[in-house]
């Protein structure tokens, strides 16, 4: 008999949502989450949109979540398609309250809830997986080895299990976030978005009121304009209007931090007893404000498919889940293209030409698979 029915690699929102939902929906299954607990805070100013509330309810954590003091977010300020910012809603147009996340606190709540529900939490990194006749052999970095009937890759954009198994990553673009933090400010700000000739910017505040500004552009443009270094970043900031005003008189706390932000998706072969959730399954442009909500949603939906497979031998749930991920990504592409299409002031610039080139098509041409870590290393070398 396998040591675990389900082993989930990664203890972020997607992995925890899958684990908690499995314990709620199929308590007979033995669930393990393997997470090294070494994720550094991304400090990106992440937002949980209103429609994610249904998944907080499903996981049974809304009351504790609200009590954790996440800042309510009702709107954004956006200068999209205009020089003057206007009040705007999330990309998907929901007219309710969202939340500006204290990400460390949110992740801690999810992990604590998973452990309380009976999930075996292993503070370790999955080093390798090997296919067995019935399930998997999983080797950990500390040298231990366990067996599991089913795997869930919840390791984020890196998708370490998918990559080990040769599952192809299909990327639509090379979007990079170049992020700079400024000292905490007493005055709160709404999430503010401002396009520019070579991409777009956003500004927000973290839970401790640290102000965060990010320039979003493609990796080649980041390299050409020196956006990986503070001098180049500040020069581009000075060419903006809203962002420059929000950073006026403030001193950067550090050099820009670079994060991959490309739109991508992966499809796990039906023959493998495995699913991917969160950014390991698909990753969205930050313009969508959908990252955390998508992770929770995919984790919950994957849990149903896994339980049906293991308890009833019914594989239709896995098929529906894979179709859902594919359809969700197709719909996201269409919505994102429409949103980028609203901005026409710099249609002659490479960043915008790339976004406008496939309007009305099913999606942009997919780029060949290339590891994002290679891009990031190259960019940091020129910083």
Image (cartoon, grey):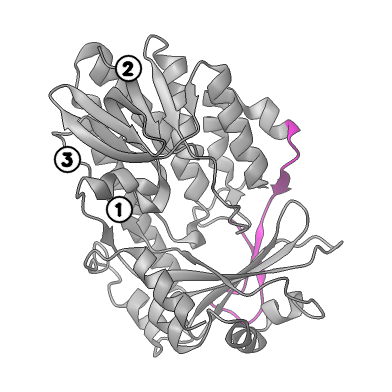
Disc assigned to residue 245: none
| Quarter of the rendering containing residue 243 | bottom right
Q: CA distance from mark 1 to mark 2?
A: 30 Å
Find out whether the residues at labels 1 and 2 contact each other: C-beta distance under 8 Å. no
Q: Residue 141: in sight, yes or no?
A: yes
Could you tell me residue 296's position as x and y percent?
Answer: 47, 37
Residue 70 among those drawn in magenta: yes
Relative side of 255 to 59, left or right: right
Quickly name the residue at label 2. 3
Secondary structure beneath dot 2 equals loop
Secondary structure beneath dot 3 equals loop
Quickly name the residue at label 3. 269
Q: Is residue 345 above or below residue 304?
A: below
Q: Residue 328: in sight, yes or no?
A: no
Q: Is residue 113 above or below residue 360?
A: above
Nearer the camera: disc 1 or disc 2: 2
Quickly name the residue at label 1. 265
Mark closest to the chain's N terminus, 3 or 2: 2
Could you tell me residue 151's position as x and y percent?
Answer: 30, 31
Mark closest to the chain's N terminus, 1 or 2: 2
Q: Residues within 10 Å of mark 2 (few under 14, many from 20)?
A: some
Q: Residue at x 30, y 43 (%)?
A: 161
Secondary structure beneath dot 1 equals strand
| Magenta stretch in the rendered image | 67-89
Q: Is residue 101 above or below residue 182?
A: above
* Extreme residue in the top direction: 28
| Quarter of the rendering containing residue 370 | bottom left
């Amino acid at each position: 008999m396998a040591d675990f029915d389900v082993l989930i690699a990664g203890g972020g929102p997607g992995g925890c949502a899958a684990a908690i939902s499995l314990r709620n929906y199929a308590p007979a299954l033995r669930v393990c989450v393997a997470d090294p607990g070494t994720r550094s805070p991304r400090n990106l100013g992440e937002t949980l949109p209103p429609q994610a509330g249904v998944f907080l309810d499903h996981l049974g954590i809304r009351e504790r979540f609200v009590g954790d003091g996440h800042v309510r977010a009702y709107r954004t300020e956006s200068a999209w398609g205009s020089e003057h910012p206007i009040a705007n809603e999330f990309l998907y147009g929901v007219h309710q309250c969202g939340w500006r996340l204290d990400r460390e606190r949110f992740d801690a709540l999810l992990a604590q809830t998973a452990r309380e529900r009976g999930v075996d939490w292993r503070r370790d990194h999955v080093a390798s997986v090997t296919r067995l006749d019935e399930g998997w052999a999983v080797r950990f970095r500390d040298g231990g080895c366990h067996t599991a009937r089913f795997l869930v890759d919840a390791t984020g954009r890196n998708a370490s299990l998918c990559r080990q198994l040769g599952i192809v990553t299909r990327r639509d673009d090379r979007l990079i976030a170049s992020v700079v933090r400024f000292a905490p400010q007493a005055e709160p700000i709404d999430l503010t978005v401002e396009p520019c000739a070579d991409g777009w910017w956003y500004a927000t505040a973290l839970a401790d009121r640290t102000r965060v500004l990010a320039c979003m552009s493609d990796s080649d443009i980041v390299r050409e304009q020196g956006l990986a270094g503070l001098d180049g970043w500040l020069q581009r900031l000075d060419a903006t209007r809203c962002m420059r005003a929000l950073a006026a008189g403030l001193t950067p706390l550090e050099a820009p931090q670079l994060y991959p932000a490309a739109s991508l998706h992966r499809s796990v072969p039906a023959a493998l007893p495995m699913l991917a959730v969160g950014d390991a399954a698909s990753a969205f442009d930050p313009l969508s404000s959908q990252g955390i909500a998508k992770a929770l949603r995919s984790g919950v939906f994957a849990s149903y498919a896994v339980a049906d497979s293991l308890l009833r031998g019914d594989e239709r749930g896995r098929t529906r889940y894979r179709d859902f991920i594919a359809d969700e990504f197709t719909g996201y592409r269409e919505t994102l293209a429409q949103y980028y299409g609203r901005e026409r002031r710099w249609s002659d610039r490479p960043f915008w030409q790339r976004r406008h080139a496939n309007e009305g098509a099913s999606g942009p041409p997919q780029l060949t698979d290339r590891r994002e870590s290679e891009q990031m290393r190259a960019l940091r070398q020129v910083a």
